[in-house]
Image (cartoon, grey):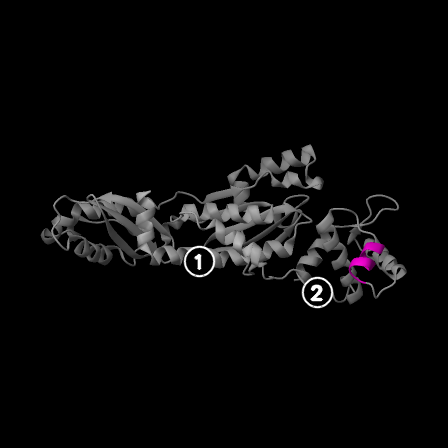
């Protein structure tokens, strides 16, 4: 983070913070009178005007029209994000709204990711993007086989990233008592600790005593191998929400935005966050960002394991504090959903019967 202490006095920082937050809220140029009335009543209007002029001279502010108020530049947003953006607790209502989305019957990783992208977009009113890494390297933690009757079993695959896949498979007819329990033990002995791309069952593993389970094991190999992806998967929600903001709904800007976000490779590059910091913010063209836009990115983790990146794209006057807070809360909410589903297989059974 850049050190602004030698360039901006605390008073200038305070005034700039007030102007940025007012512009984020209204989208209208901000006057010295508004800053004094709403934010800093212990400084005279004349002093505020003088400081605003100095900030404009330093490149932090822009005055769109003579005699109008000022708006922040990309440089101002960068300073604001570096100093004043923090994870703040969401309101009870915001938490309830987010939690209500997860009441739907979602189990598989792809369902959870899609729902997460939708929630983030709906709650922030910006475009959300989630990029999921190649999952072939995740390791299998446990496989559960649950008898749901009618010679069928629900297969639940749990990995070290908390990702799960459920699928119903057919069981052999006239199974002997204890068949499923024995099969579960055998399957876990074969698969536990292996990564998805290591799943291959040589014939020698299926000895004469295990012939009864070979068909079932083969079906499990098919289920697990379906995890394999040749490339990263991208999920996007709310791509047109950028047009809700007057400064972004110019036809040329809109066309440029849509042409970029509709290309998978472009989205991956925009959202990639190789830094160790928890949240990364790109303002405008910084680090290959988008002109007149801002992008907040974070690691997408499940059970503490990074499985991809999540990003929020909006106008430069994005509500950064809210976006960071939503992304922070979502990481916890997703983990709770995963753990709830893993530990309550009966719900998985009921969902598959619907």
Question: Would residue 137 be found to the left or right of residue 115 on screen?
Answer: left
On screen, residue 295 above or below 89: above
Labels 1 and 2: the sequence-earlier one:
2
Q: Can you see residue 161?
A: no
Q: Disc 2 designates what residue? A: 3
**Where on the picture, by quarter, is residue 267?**
top right
Question: Would residue 25 be found to the left or right of residue 303 on screen?
Answer: right
Relative depth, front residue between 224 and 196: 224
Specify the principal SS of the magenta part. Answer: helix
- Label 1 neighbourhood size at 10 Å, few (<14), some (14-19), many (20+)? some
Picture disc at residue 70: none
Question: Would residue 152 be found to the left or right of residue 343 on screen?
Answer: left
Q: Position of residue 150 (x, y in %)?
A: 20, 43
**Where on the picture, by quarter, is residue 281?**
bottom right
Picture disc at residue 335: 1
User: Which stretch did the figure color magenta?
Assistant: 33-40
Q: Where is residue 309 in the image (x, y as percent from the top left)?
A: 50, 51
- Give the secondary structure at mark 2: loop
Whether 14 is among the magenta residues is: no
Q: For the view shown, which residue lies furthest in the right direction?
A: 46
- Label 2 neighbourhood size at 10 Å, few (<14), some (14-19), many (20+)? few
Whether 35 is among the magenta residues is: yes
In the image, what residue occupies the spot 65% across and 52% down?
319
Give the position of the N terminus as an image quadrant.
bottom right
Q: Position of residue 72 (x, y in %)?
A: 75, 51
Q: Where is residue 59 in the image (x, y as percent from the top left)?
A: 79, 53
- Give the secondary structure at mark 1: helix
Relative depth, front residue between 308 and 97: 97
Estimate the spatial distance between the alpha carbons at disc 1 and disc 2, rounded to whole Å: 35 Å
In the image, what residue occupies the spot 33% across and 55% down?
158
């Amino acid at each position: 983070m850049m050190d602004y202490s030698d360039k901006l006095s605390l008073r200038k920082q305070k005034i700039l913070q007030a102007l940025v937050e007012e512009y984020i809220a209204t989208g209208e140029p901000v006057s010295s009178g508004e800053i004094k009335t709403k934010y800093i009543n212990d400084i005279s209007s004349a002093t505020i005007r003088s400081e605003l002029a100095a900030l404009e001279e330093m490149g932090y502010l822009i005055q769109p029209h003579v005699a109008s108020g000022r708006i922040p530049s990309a440089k101002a947003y960068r300073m604001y994000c570096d100093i004043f953006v923090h994870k703040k607790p969401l309101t009870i209502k915001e938490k309830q709204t987010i939690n209500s989305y997860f009441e739907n019957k979602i189990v598989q990783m792809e369902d959870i990711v899609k729902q997460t992208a939708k929630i983030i977009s709906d709650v922030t009113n910006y475009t959300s993007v989630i990029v999921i890494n190649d999952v072939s390297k995740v390791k299998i933690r446990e496989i559960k086989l649950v008898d749901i009757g009618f010679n069928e079993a629900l297969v639940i695959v749990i990995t070290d990233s908390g990702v799960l896949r459920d699928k119903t498979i057919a069981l052999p007819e006239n199974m002997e008592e204890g068949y499923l329990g024995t099969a579960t033990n055998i399957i876990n002995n074969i698969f536990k600790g292996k990564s998805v791309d290591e799943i291959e069952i040589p014939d020698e593993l299926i000895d004469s005593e295990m012939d009864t389970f070979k068909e079932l094991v083969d079906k499990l190999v098919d289920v697990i191998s379906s995890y394999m992806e040749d490339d990263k998967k991208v999920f996007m929600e709310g791509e047109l929400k950028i047009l809700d903001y007057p400064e972004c709904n110019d036809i040329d800007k809109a066309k440029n935005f849509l042409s970029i976000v509709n290309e998978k490779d472009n989205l991956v590059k925009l959202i990639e966050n190789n830094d160790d910091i928890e949240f990364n913010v790109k303002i405008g063209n910084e680090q290959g960002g988008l002109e007149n836009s801002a992008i907040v990115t974070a690691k997408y983790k499940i059970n503490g394991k990074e499985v991809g990146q999540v990003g929020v794209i909006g106008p430069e006057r994005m509500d950064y504090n809210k976006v960071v807070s939503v992304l922070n809360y979502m990481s916890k909410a997703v983990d709770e959903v995963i753990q709830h589903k893993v530990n309550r297989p009966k719900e998985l059974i009921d969902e598959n019967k619907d």
